[in-house]
Amino acid sequence: MSSNFLVNFVYLLFEVLSFAILARVVLSWLDQTGSWRISEIVHEITEPILGPIRNILPTVGMFDFSPIVAILLLNALGRLLLQILQ
């Protein structure tokens, strides 16, 4: 039973993180100054994931591809962990 809980927890955690990254992208269009409280919260949740990726990726004009890479990495890591746990 604890294994089932762990599988569900890992799945939910990776889904929430992916959703938070998507929310950050949308909020960056709606709140460009980042002054809304929800923008601050989402930034605090996602920056530990996006920051290191942004440091590695080269800048392509004004486009930030770190959210795409982060979601792909979260998806791959989540699948790997779920395979290990099951």
Image (cartoon, helix red, strand yellow):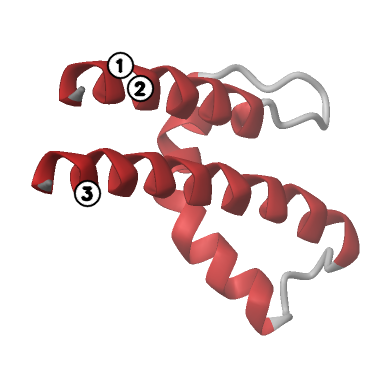
Q: Quadrant of the C terminus?
A: top left
Dot 3 and dot 2 residues touching (CB under 8 Å): no
In the image, residue 71 lies at what x, y percent?
A: 56, 30
Q: Would you name the residue on which mark 2 appears?
A: 77
Choose between 42 and 35: the one closer to the eye.
42
Residue furthest left as drawn: 2
- Residues at badges 1 and 2 in contact (C-beta under 8 Å)? yes
Horizontal and vertical percent for residue 56?
46, 21
Q: Is residue 29 left or right of residue 72?
A: right
30 or 59, nearer to the observer: 30
What whole-number distance in Å separates the C-alpha atoms at marks 3 and 1? 17 Å
Give SS at disc 1: helix
Q: Are marks 3 and 1 in contact (CB under 8 Å)?
A: no
**Residue sitting at x 60%, y 30%:** 66
- Give the amino acid at mark 2: Leu
* Residue depth check, mark 3 versus mark 1: number of the one nearer the observer: 3
Above or below residue 74? Residue 23 is below
Q: Secondary structure at mark 3?
A: helix
- What residue is shown with label 1? 80
Q: Which mark is residue 5?
A: 3
Q: Is residue 32 left or right of residue 74?
A: right
Q: Amino acid at mark 3?
A: Phe
Q: Residue at x 88, y 55 (%)?
A: 29
Q: Amino acid at mark 1?
A: Leu
